[in-house]
Image (cartoon, grey):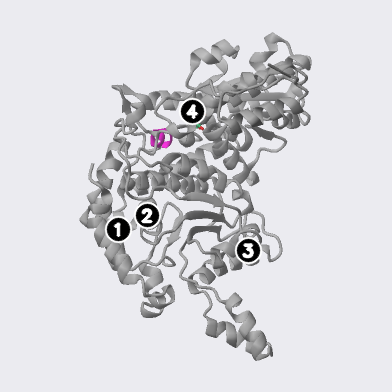
Amino acid sequence: MTDITKTPEWQALEGAAAALSKTHMRGLFEHDPARFDAFSIEGAGLFLDYSKNKIDAAARNALLALAKARDLEGARRRMLAGEKINTTEDRAVLHVALRDFAMRDYHVDGENVSLAVRRELERIESFADRIHSGGLKGFKGDAIDTVVNIGIGGSDLGPKMVVEALRPYWVKGRRAYFVSNVDGQHLSDVLTEVDPAKTLFLVASKTFTTQETMTNAQSARDWFLSQGGKESDIAAHFAALSTNAHAVEQFGIDPENMFQFWGWVGGRFSLWSAIGLSIALQVGFENFERLLKGAHAMDEHFRVAPLAENIPILMALVGVWNRNFMDARAHAILPYDEHLSLLPSYLQQADMESNGKSRNAEGEALAARTGPIIFGEPGTNGQHAFYQLLHQGTDLVSADFIAPALSQSPLGDHHEKLLANFLAQPEALMRGKTEEEAREELAADDLTKDEIDALAPHKVFPGDRPANSILFEKLTPETLGALIAAYEHKIFCQGVIWGVNSFDQWGVELGKVLAKDILPEIAALGEEMPQVSSHDPSTAGLINRINAIRGGKATG
Ligand code: F6P
């Protein structure tokens, strides 16, 4: 594969970046009063303003040329056609098939998978109906009103984020908990809050082999049996969301209570599948379907909108611009909606597990930087934490500011204040404050010349810092679905540009394997353990110290 940095399209982009190097973003706005219109687009209920990036028409054209040269449209077609674009795992990537309300058929290995998708959705609907109508009774005859989703990574972050985002849609009287960490405190804390007779455990794991999830599921099962539940009651209190029917059965979950998905659904793209059962139970099947419909609307936009008017594609290209040509080190996700508080951590997995790679799909080392560090917090909290670095730090950080124009729960003038901050922060990042402006302000405050000299440098904001603003009417299931789908497609497009396979995750393996080796070397409380000398001296030293603290007497 050619080194992307040597291509004429890449070099044209370097030229476009060099041409802008002496221009401040303030100047771009001053010279083009129509800049906002020229650098914003909309679709599927989302409005994207990317005018506060240091980009001009020439740079945008060069980015679009790069997309063409990387055959982004061909890659999109191949993904949507169910080709096995996840080459290292020999899998198709078809999360769009889980939400295709245009009723297209998708085929994998000659099989029409859409039929199975529809069948599984119907099963989810009727299961949700049974739970909501009180038809499914717990072992003491009570209606099930609580769900504990046990999963990790994609089997946790997506449904947890959506359930929180759709708080205003919660079915009255229902509670949903999410347990992910193998730290027993996580499960223990949740178990103190739930009534075993009214609780349904959803064991959510694509593989049904993940250490954390299987440990938590086993402990939940033991707890359930210790609380009066019998083996025969497991059927009413445990369901599985998985691709691995054999392991589900071995665990002892009734196949009737298994909701299936498939290898072509990536873990971090799985909230639309059976992994979303906790969503359907907490907000109702109808709202789960609205979420899928919103994502479908974005899929249609992504499928047909021209490159220059395509939200996920523009988000991807502007991201490449900032990362590779403006030297942005990280990308902040900044939702101005408390209910989107889990969006940054959800996107951390979606983006960093997808594009945090330094080899291309063929295994060759990549010359260009790939996925940035993703982090974030809801506004306005982040403003009082890390925005200092965004405004005046030595590293460039790009950002997505995300907000609904209308609040789901209007309260006094809270939302006006929230929106004022949502607008002010990217304006400040873009404009900055010159030394002259800082001095004028200080002079207006009647400071002496010495005081002004001392303080002015600290009051300077370089500005010229990039941000997108993503605006929508209200955080509904539809807009949320569209927002998540936009990010999914953005991540895919960036992978295509950089040449990485966004759908494998080999980088999570090594640590998992080493943890398995170390596990038998950690002493149980009070147990005698031989001194460990395998591993590097640091790891061995830490193991021996931990064993000593745990009461172990080193032998040998
Ligand atoms: O962290 C690695 C990973 O494989 C993720 O990709 C996945 O979402 C998570 O573990 C959980 O996997 P599973 O759903 O198979 O338990």
Q: Nearer the viewer, mark 3 or mark 1?
A: 1
For the residues labelled 3 and 1, the Cα–Cα distance comes to 33 Å
According to the picture, the residue beneath numbered tag 1 turns out to be 63
For label 2, count other residues whose C-alpha is less than 10 Å away and answer few (under 14), some (14-19) or many (20+).
many
Residue type beneath disc 4 = Leu
Q: Which residues are magenta?
A: 95-99
On the rendered structure, is 266 left or right of 148?
A: left
Looking at the rendered structure, the secondary structure element under dot 2 is helix
Front residue of this view, candidates 305 and 340: 340
Looking at the rendered structure, the secondary structure element under dot 3 is helix
Single out the residue that lies furthest toward the front. Answer: 556
Q: Nearer the viewer, mark 4 or mark 3?
A: 3
Q: Could you say which disc has been placed on residue 418 in the image?
A: 3
Task: Check if mark 4's residue and mark 2's residue have beta carbons within 8 Å.
Answer: no
Q: Residue at x 38, y 50 (%)?
A: 369
Q: Earlier in the sequence, mark 4 or mark 1?
A: 1
Q: Could you say which disc has been placed on residue 121 in the image?
A: 4
Task: For the N terminus, give its image quadrant.
Answer: top left
Task: For the C terminus, give its image quadrant.
Answer: top right
Task: Check if mark 2's residue and mark 1's residue have beta carbons within 8 Å.
Answer: yes
According to the picture, the residue beneath numbered tag 2 turns out to be 320
Whether the magenta-drawn stretch holds residue 464 is answered as: no
